[in-house]
Amino acid sequence: MLLMVNWELYPDKKLDAFAAFSQMTAEDDAADLGPDITLVGRWHDLASGRGAAIIECDSAEAVSSWVYNWSEVISSTVTPVLDDEAARAVIKAKLAG
C-alpha cells in the first residue's frame, strides 16, 4: 500500500531535528525505516520545517514505529494514496457501476 506521510517540525525542536537528520547515513536511514517500509521518495521544505514522503508498506505497526522514532520533534499525518493508474481504475469502476 502506498502512503503519504506529511510532517511539520515543532519550532522549538527544528535545529535538533536538523542536527539528527543531517548526521544520518543511508544505513541509519534504512534502520530507522525498518525492514517493512520502502521509501519511494521524500521531500523537505527546510525553511518551513515541513516535508512529505511517499512510502510503501502493508503494516500499520511498522509505519507507526517509524513515525514514533521522530515523535519528539514532529507532528505528522499518514494518508493512504493511489498512483494515477490505481486512481483511474477506482474512478472508472465507480462511474460504471
Image: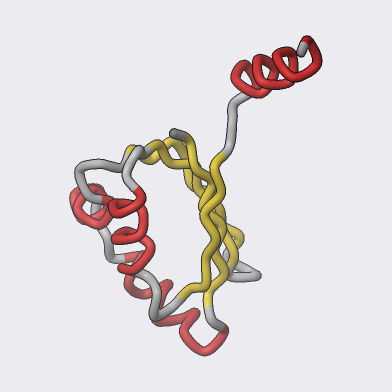
Instruction: Name the one closer to the observer, 57 or 74.
Output: 57
Question: Residue 1 occupies which quadrant of the picture?
Answer: top left
Q: How is the image coloured?
A: secondary structure
Q: Is residue 20 above or below residue 44?
A: below
Q: Residue at x 78, y 10 (%)?
A: 96
Q: Is residue 3 left or right of residue 67?
A: right
Instruction: Name the one closer to the observer, 48 or 63.
Output: 63
Q: Is residue 28 left or right of residue 19?
A: left
Q: Quadrant of the C terminus?
A: top right
Task: Residue lying at the far front in this picture: please name it.
Answer: 97
Question: Residue 38 occupies which quadrant of the picture?
Answer: top left
Q: Residue at x 70, y 17 (%)?
A: 88
Q: Residue 17: x, y in percent?
A: 41, 75
Q: Residue at x 31, y 42 (%)?
A: 37
Task: Residue lying at the far bottom in this picture: please name it.
Answer: 12
Q: Residue 47: x, y in percent?
A: 63, 69
